[in-house]
Amino acid sequence: MQPGPEKVGPTLAMAAAILQTKEDFFLAVQHGDLDVAKEAVEVAQPRLTMNGWTLLFAAAARNASLGGAEVLCRRLIARHVNVRGSDKKGRTPLFYAAESGHASLCTYLVTRVGMSVDDEDDSGLTPLACALKAGEIDASVTLLRQGASLGYVNSKGNAVYQFASEYVLGLLQGRKGQWVKPNTNRKRSLQDSQACDLETLEEWAAKRPKCFAAGEPIVRHLADRVIVENETHSAFVPLKDPELRKVRLLEKGLVLDQARLFQSELFVHAMPPEHWADTLGTHSTESVATNRIRRVVQSTSQDSETIVAAVCRASGHIVGFSRASKRPFAELYIETLKVQAGHELQGIARLMIQAAEIQAAKKGFATAKVGSRCLRQNVNAQRFFKRLGFAEVPEPANTDLHSPLVDCIKFERAVAVRHRVSGKSSM
């Protein structure tokens, strides 16, 4: 039996005949034979768009079985197709490359084009979430190596890893050696995984301001800044720059404390400090966070927030801080409460809550109750609130799949009627 004629791919003339309308170009690049797609890329106007897409989107979304996605994208970029901006869904081409399983293309778009691995589209997905949802493990591993966050919590309260099935997470766990931060003391190279783990967060939390080179600030002569005190500690409003920087250092320590509650979870191996900070109520950038603290404590108006700190009278060291805000329904809400390690069980947290109530009254807050939330994972914090007379408040169950990083329990108690207020500092 004689073999049949060899199958011949489309000629350039055939491609020219096919590419008549704008829709033809996008169909060819996304779904067509590779030769036709290449011809479409060569003859199309770089500014050609359709429904919010350039041809770069179409090439990135090309089915992996057709091949050539990266070749097409590289050629389009060489022809100066716009690489900035997003489509009507809030997505960049990286989303479609990840969803379609183009691992190598993902690397190129991140490292050479500069697309962000942690952009969030209008439905709350990141490129990594798209890859995980589609079951594209190679693309997922590639994005994790480029620093994508597995624990990033989107605007809807869902973490990236929650878009993956248990099967996909199992595969990701099995390939952890390919994407976790290298266990080495040498400086990471561009070829190493850029994933941020708990050690990265510890380094961020431990970074001290330059003004602490000679030691932490010693707080003396508080005079009329004392709000309330007990036998060993005083609560006051921090105003001086070194005091504010110590409050910031404690704030970072609080983020680390809460992160350690999840150290057995897979997502802690790929979550940068900025995402931990954003999710847990602060900012990762020192200047931004410190300036925010400064604005609150220096405000002379009836601001909706108040910040107090606690100082050990014996040493003069600041050992705790609390930030509270005015909420609807006459609630004073304790946003953050941190006591430095080694100073627990000395009544400092109770003292700072009292100080926050007094400051709220001075600012004219009409408050009838004090409330706060703590992570469901944080059993010690729950016990603490109960010891202080707070009661757990039932809240409507949320049927959406929320990250454990935002899964909290609400506590409330009535505002204390009277407090022992210090008229002078004993320091």
Image: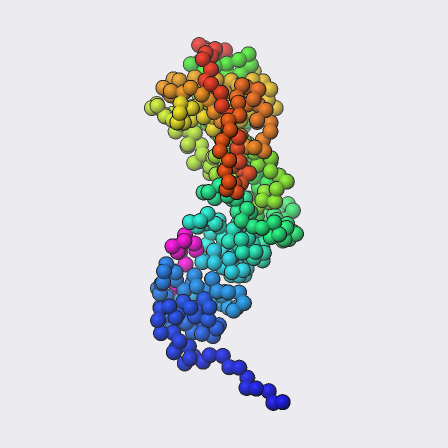
Residue 199 in view: no
Along the line of sight, the residue nearer the viewer: 188 or 83: 83
Q: Is residue 394 above or below residue 109?
A: above
Whether the magenta-drawn stretch holds residue 89 is answered as yes
Does 8 appear above or below 191? below
Q: Residue at x 49, y 33 (%)?
A: 396
Q: Which contiguous range is marked in magenta?
A: 80-92
Task: Please give the count of numbered marks on the rendered protein.
Answer: 0
Name the residue rendered at 45%, 26% in the picture: 333
The image quarter containing residue 101 is: bottom right
Question: Is residue 223 highlighted in magenta?
Answer: no
The residue most toward the bottom is 2
Q: Is residue 237 left or right of residue 175?
A: left
Q: Return the x and y of residue 63 as percentages of the image width and height.
A: 50, 65
Q: Evaluate whether residue 125 shows in this view.
A: yes
Q: Residue at x 57, y 20 (%)?
A: 387
Residue 52, percent from left and from top: 37, 58
The picture places residue 84, in percent across and down from the top left corner, at: 40, 56
Q: Main secondary structure of the magenta part?
A: loop
Q: Is residue 297 left or right of residue 319?
A: left
- Frontmost residue, 69 versus 14: 14
Residue at screen point 35% across, 65% down: 48
On the image, the x and y values in percent for residue 246 come to: 50, 27
Check the picture and name the quadrant holding the N terminus. Answer: bottom right
Q: Among all residues in the image, which is located at the extreme left?
A: 301
Q: How is the image coloured?
A: rainbow
